[in-house]
Amino acid sequence: MITKYNNSAVFLHWIIGFLLIFLLITGTFVLSEIPNTLEKIGNFRIHMILGILISILSVIRIVNIIKSKKPEDLQMSKLRLKLMKINHVLIYVVVIAIGVSGILLAKSTGLGDIVFFGSNNEIYESFKDYSFGKIHGFLTKVLLFLIATHILGVVSYSIKNKINITKRMWFK
Ligand code: HEM
């Protein structure tokens, strides 16, 4: 009987979680607040490299989920179990969609060429005027909601059942 996630799942879960929180906070409160001048290129570079890294790690995690044996289900109502699984799937779908929309935004506005390939083109004044920019920003709010409900679910289950289920997602 498997009671814990495997070590690669644990590593990927916490590294992706940490990077997501970092990008969600800095993206919302720092990056999108700074005017689009040349001084911002370093910030863009960090955001874009980490965003691409998260997207790649998430694809690896999805493959890991499909290929590895899962721990047994937690004891809860069928409805709650279903909602929990939907929450998990949606998190990965939305993370990948954020990564793809970010890449499409950078590609379609020439930002990728400016940041990574030294292009001298001017940076657009606001990325919020672009559909990919609007989609990227909107999905980050959806992800915040999904992560908040994910954490709320873990905490409420642990309190109600008096067990620390985060131990399932820690190294063996
Ligand atoms: C997958 C993880 C990612 C997360 C969690 C994330 C998060 C964010 C957040 C929270 C914002 C601010 C949105 C707003 O408040 O309007 C933002 C903006 C942005 N992101 Fe991402 N992002 C990710 C990936 C990427 C990637 C892969 C790229 C490009 C290669 C990218 C490029 C951008 C750009 C160009 C902006 C606009 C910044 C501005 O308005 O000045 N992001 N991102």
Image (cartoon, rainbow, N blue to C red):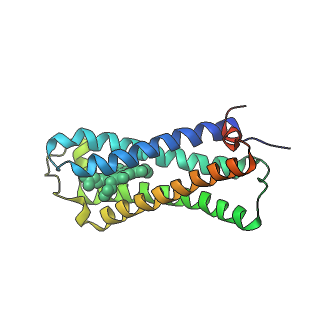
Residue extending farthest to the right is: 1
- Looking at the image, residue 75 sits to the left or right of residue 7; the answer is right
Left or right, 73 with respect to 36, comes to right
The residue that appears at 39% across and 49% down in the rendered structure is 24
Looking at the picture, tell me which residue is in the foreground, 102 or 14.
14
Q: Position of residue 110 (x, y in %)?
A: 23, 54
Q: Residue at x 71, y 39 (%)?
A: 6
**Would residue 82 appear left or right of 47 to someone viewing this image?**
right
Residue at position x 74%, y 45% from top?
162
* Quarter location, residue 118: top left
Dividing the picture into quadrants, the one containing residue 44 is top left
Give residue 78's quadrant in the image: bottom right
Viewer-side residue, 131 vs 74: 74
Res 76 visible:
yes
Residue 38 sits above or below residue 152 on the image: above
Say left or right for 156 vs 2: left
Q: Which image quarter is the C terminus in?
A: top right
**Where does residue 154 sit, x and y in percent of width and height?**
64, 50
Q: Could you tell me residue 65's position as x and y percent?
A: 67, 50
The residue lying at 56 percent from left, 61 percent from top is: 90
Quadrant where the N terminus is found in the figure: top right
Q: Is residue 116 visible?
A: no
- Where's residue 3, x and y in %? 79, 42
Which of these two is toward me, 98 or 143?
Answer: 143
